[in-house]
Image: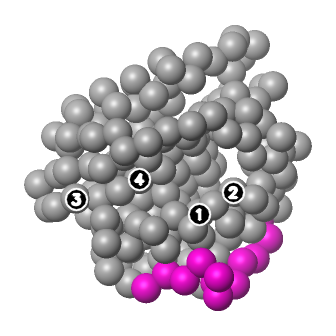
Amino acid sequence: MKRTLLLSLAASLPVTAAGQALKVLDDKRLPFSLQLPADWYGFQAADGAQGVSVVSAQKPPATLMRFLFLGKGGKNADLGTEFRNFEAGVKATGGTLRLIGGKNSAYGGVRGAERVYALKHAEGELRMRVWFGNGAKNLYSFQVTDSAARFAKSDALFKRVLGTVRFR
């Protein structure tokens, strides 16, 4: 999958996991439905990725969530390779990743793996959680990126959103 980090989107705006209203996104062009924060904004990245991206504010700094997919064309995806490619992509942008933790996980019935990273870049440090899921027809890449100071709250909201994902 092609990945582009939006490093300038590190946020200082408050996010509350428990009080955040969610709204259903059920676009038939997506191989999944989910509920997203109701007052967030759609974001179009210029990286050609398929899926949906949302930000907590119209202008940086903002929290970023991405829910992307790529057709596997009948091939089986290796999640270890996907993570290595992701990490290499970040390095190519000048960022430095430090793995904080990871685990196998499933959302909406699709098994996968997730990792949490600290990302250092020219403007500071971010945290990100990246989940790769290996579906029957698609490879999924879901992630949240935020400032280190706010990550616990935005990650809790991201986990709440992941709990609403339903694959078609």
Q: How is the image coloured?
A: one colour
| Residue located farthest toward the left when viewing the structure as drawn | 122
Residue found at x 81% / y 25%: 136
Residue 69 position within the rendered picture, expressed as x and y whole percent measured from the top left: 64, 38
Amino acid, disc 3: Glu
- Tag 1 and tag 2, C-beta contact below 8 Å: yes
Secondary structure beneath dot 2 equals: helix
Residue 29 in view, yes or no = no
Task: Mark 1 or mark 4: name the one nearer the start of the chain.
Answer: 4
Q: Residues within 10 Å of mark 3 (few under 14, many from 20)?
A: some
Residue found at x 68% / y 21%: 72
Amino acid, disc 2: Leu
Residue 52 position within the rendered picture, expressed as x and y whole percent measured from the top left: 61, 56
Amino acid, disc 1: Phe
Amino acid, disc 4: Met
Q: Quadrant of residue 26?
A: bottom right
Task: Mark 2 or mark 4: name the one nearer the start of the chain.
Answer: 4
User: Residue tagged by mark 4?
Assistant: 128
Disc sitting over residue 162 in the figure: 2
Disc sitting over residue 125 in the figure: 3
- Tag 2 and tag 4, C-beta contact below 8 Å: no
Residue 168 position within the rendered picture, expressed as x and y whole percent measured from the top left: 88, 43
- Region rendered in magenta: 14-25
Q: Quadrant of residue 162?
A: bottom right
User: Residue tagged by mark 1?
Assistant: 158
